[in-house]
Amino acid sequence: MLSMLSRLNIIESSPPRSVEEITHTAQVTMKITLIISLVTIFVTLVRPMVSELPEIFTFLGVLNASIFLALWAAFKRGYWESYSPIILAVMINLILLPMVVISGGIDSQYTPVVTVLPFGLMLIGTFHSALGTIIFWSFAWIALYFWQPTNLDLSFSPWQEGKLASQVFWLIGSSAVAMAVSLQFENIKRRQQKSLLALAEHDSLTGVYNRRGMERVLNTELLLCDRTQQKLTVMIVDVDNFKLYNDINGHPAGDKILATVANTLSKNTRAGQDTVTRFGGEEFVIILRDTDEQSAAIAAEKFRSQVEALNIPYENDKPTPLTVTLGFYSTTGKGETQSHIINQADKALYHGKVNGRNQAINAETIIA
């Protein structure tokens, strides 16, 4: 059946789960196991207050809650981490089946619990455990329809008051568990969305924001700049003679240098205020919040000197260190687009490159 579903593209193959994924799924399963235990004991203890049912159901309720509590304790200690969703699925089915049989079969008060099982298992476990549960209960319902003795319903009473009250409690309990699972699923989805966004906006080589991330951050900073009336500085940093370094030392060494430069720039920024991004190739863009021309000049000189202080030679037998050239532009953001701001900083960078490199140039001095 699974192969048929795969051919119909109803399910897709997924890559092997990472250790972090397995651990997180085990933690979610552990939480759901505890919630099931608490719901079971709550319904078991409250139900006799409003309905008359045989004492066997109270005994079984306490027993089942204890089983789930013991299972939760085992998961909490780290046992069966990789298989915890499947173990929970098997235990729920094995516990529910006899409870359904002795409480009316198809007309059982536990039917609402069964209906949410595939949904819950799909979220905390796998498609296979959910599908297995559907198949298991489909055969169980058919078997109960044809072969269950009518006198086996231990919850039967002439007025059906007990069973009706039980159904209400189990509906509430099932809804609570379904809500808990849904919240966990929502948390997982949001975490994955953040992870995907981080991957889409970060440069895999250097770990800083890529161009897409830069555009988003710059847009946010310009909006903030416009609201606070404070100046924003955008700085382009270019590694001098990087092509020469690549030709001499090879591209792997060049990649390592880019990562080192990005790390050096990041270490010398203000946490939570400045953002280092890779603009492309050997160029980086630094976005400096609340920074005017004078402060930007000080920051630029700091960036330049810190990279030079790395003492990375172009060639082993030549002491000339690798350097960077910087061009920056400060703005209040009013009426200026991202492309205009970047273009101004790029003009300053170009001026620094043609006038000797290893220096920081303010775009305002070029414009003037």
Image (spheres, helix red, strand yellow):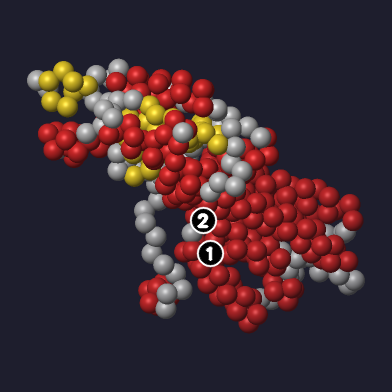
Horizontal side of residue 38 vs 209, given as left or right: right
Residue type indicated by callout 2: Gly
Q: x and y percent of residue 244 in the render?
A: 16, 35
In the image, 55 versus 82, the foreground residue is: 82
Residue type indicated by callout 1: Ala
Horizontal side of residue 328 vs 97, given as left or right: left
Label whose residue precedes the other's in the sequence (2 or 1): 2
Pointer 2 residue: 125
- Crowding at mark 2 (Cα within 10 Å: few <14, some 14-19, many 20+): many
Which numbered circle lies on residue 130?
A: 1
Quarter occupied by residue 315: top left
Helix, strand or loop at disc 2? loop
Residue 340's place in the image compared with 246, above or below, is: below
At a point 53% along the width and 72% down the height, the residue shown is: 135
Q: x and y percent of residue 230 in the render?
A: 63, 32
Q: x and y percent of residue 54 in the render?
A: 80, 58
Which numbered circle lies on residue 170?
A: none
Instruction: Give the total number of marks visible in the rendering.
Output: 2
Residue 368's place in the image compared with 197, above or below, is: above
At a point 55% along the width and 28% down the height, the residue shown is: 291
Quarter occupied by residue 2: bottom left
Q: x and y percent of residue 229 in the render?
A: 66, 35
Mark 2 in CB contact with mark 1 (< 8 angstroms): yes
Distance, label 2 to label 1, CA atoms, is: 8 Å
At a point 60% along the width and 37% down the height, the residue shown is: 332
Helix, strand or loop at disc 1? helix
Residue farthest to the left? 317
In the image, 306 versus 178, the foreground residue is: 306
Residue 118's place in the image compared with 72, above or below, is: below
